[in-house]
Amino acid sequence: MHLLKTLLTTTFCMAALVSPAKAEYPEKPIRMVVGYAPGGAADKLVRPITDRLARLFKQPFVIDYKPGAGAALAAEITAKAPADGYTLHITDSGPMTILPHMRKLGYDPLNSFTPISMVGGGGVVVVVLPTSKATDMKSLVELAKKDPKNWSYGTSGVGGVGHLAGEQFKAAAKLDIGHIPYKGGSPAITELLGGHVPVLFSSLGSASSQIQAGKLRALADSSSKRSSMFPDVPTMAEAGFPGFDASIWFGIVGPAGLPKEVMDKWVPALASVLKDPEVIAAIKREGYDPMPMTPQQTAERIKSDFELWGKTVKSANITAD
């Protein structure tokens, strides 16, 4: 009996010695889910990031485009994926902080994800034609109050940050002007250039080339700090609206419950990549500034914007199309 126990113990120990060690993450390609079609801002931001991460991780990235439902489809796919570090998602403020207040979704933005880091962000820019009598936010308010029937503001669509920033502005300025939603940033810019709408709340990415060409005048930036692309454009707070902060941002998240060994790889790797000059240049080309954050800071930003936009959606009675 003693001999049998000794043999069994020896066999077990030898098996443990020869059993393969657990492979280090990552050991296979990583999927990055994108909620928009190729060629958009999310795509242009994530490609240089994943190119550099692939070198660090020594594994390729597969960009998986899942457009639909205002990027909520991609978020839901990510939320329901295994929490093994092989499905990540570049998300943005829309599906994480605005859409949840407008329709029922297949995920909880505060509990269905593991935040890793923000990538880049920036404000909405208030733009008019160079011939407009509105030369700053103060004169814009004065003109709109004198003739509200002939003043309205345009945006890229219902429920975007531009729309919510416009509603925040209306409430702060005590204005009663209409909202004209267009089907995207480019159509909205075209309508403004054609004189069909007097003022636009636009992403910097959509308006930057026209501002630089002198075809549009920027009155203010809705974020809490001036854009590095247009440092002469004041923030809304500087223009007479204290505490005003409405920003668009992009960030990287995974499904809830990502293991420590995955986070230990991703957090320093992404922080390093976001310091890369070419990545910074790519972020700025889209009209944003780099926005690296810790996972905790990222989670806090998502939560604070979720609460902010929830109040705006409710007070302005904004509903989904």
Image (cartoon, rainbow, N blue to C red):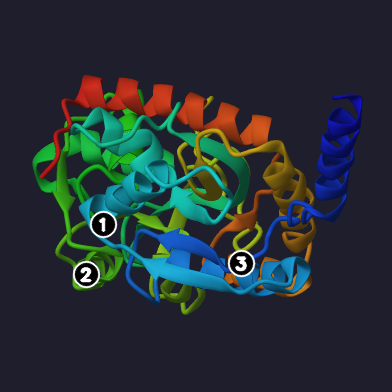
Specify the quadrant that holds the N terminus. Answer: top right
| Residue drawn at x 23%, y 73% as measured from the top left | 190
- SS state under label 3: loop
* Residue highlighted by disc 3: 28
Total marks drawn? 3
Q: Are marks 1 and 3 in contact (CB under 8 Å)?
A: no
Q: Farthest residue toward the front?
A: 1
Residue 9 placed where, x, y %? 86, 34
Task: Tell whether 95 sits left or right of 125.
Answer: left
Task: Tell whether 304 sits left or right of 316.
Answer: right
Residue 246 placed where, x, y %? 45, 38
* Residue highlighted by disc 2: 187
Among numbered discs 2 and 1, the one appearing first in the sequence: 1
Q: Are marks 2 and 1 in contact (CB under 8 Å)?
A: yes
- Mark 2 belongs to which amino acid? Pro
Among numbered discs 3 and 2, the one appearing first in the sequence: 3
- Looking at the picture, does residue 116 appear above or below residue 53? above
Badge nearest the viewer, 1 or 3: 3
Q: Are marks 3 and 2 in contact (CB under 8 Å)?
A: no
Residue 283 placed where, x, y %? 60, 65
* Residue highlighted by disc 1: 156
